[in-house]
Image (cartoon, grey):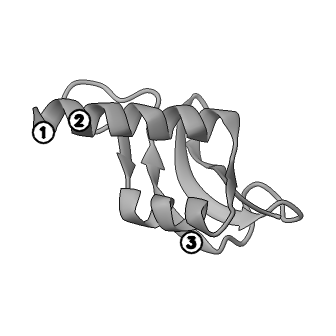
Amino acid sequence: MVKIRLARAGCKGRPFYHVVVSTDRTARDSNNIERLGFFNPVALGKEVSLELNMDRVAYWLGVGAKPTEKVSSLIKRTRKASVAAAA
């Protein structure tokens, strides 16, 4: 099964996550099919905390990829922000 999930990067005490598409059999930080964006939970000031390529996310969801709980909440957050920016 193909999943959309977070792959950890960064250093100890300063996490940074890539939003990736990978199979559920691969390890969390190993090879992935495609990188869709990033999530920085400790962003300060003007740093960008979340960036997703929503066109590619929509494609992968359309072909049956299942997002994890955290990634689905990040997708909702991105959609909400894009609707607010358009208004």
Name the residue rendered at 33%, 31% in the picture: 80
The amino acid type of the residue labelled 3 equals Glu
Q: Distance between the Cα atoms at labels 2 and 1? A: 5 Å
Badge 1: how crowded within 10 Å, few (<14), some, or many (20+)? few
**Image coords of residue 43 (percent x, y):** 35, 29
Check whether the beta carbons of the residues at disc 2 and disc 1 lie within 8 A of each other.
Answer: yes
Q: Which badge, 3 or 1, is on the more N-terminal residue? A: 3
Question: Across the whole image, how many numbered discs are drawn on residues?
Answer: 3
Closer to us: mark 3 or mark 1? 1
Q: Decide: is 20 above or below 13.
A: below
Which mark is on residue 86? 1
Residue labelled with disc 2: 83
Which residue, as the protein is rendered here, is positioned at the far front? 62
Q: Where does the N terminus fall, quadrant-wise?
A: bottom right
The amino acid type of the residue labelled 2 equals Val
Residue labelled with disc 3: 34
Quadrant in the picture for residue 28: bottom right
Name the residue rendered at 36%, 38% in the picture: 78
**Image coords of residue 18 (percent x, y):** 53, 53
**Image coords of residue 59 (percent x, y):** 50, 68
Q: In the displayed structure, does residue 24 sit left or right of residue 38?
A: right
Q: Which badge, 3 or 2, is on the more N-terminal residue? A: 3
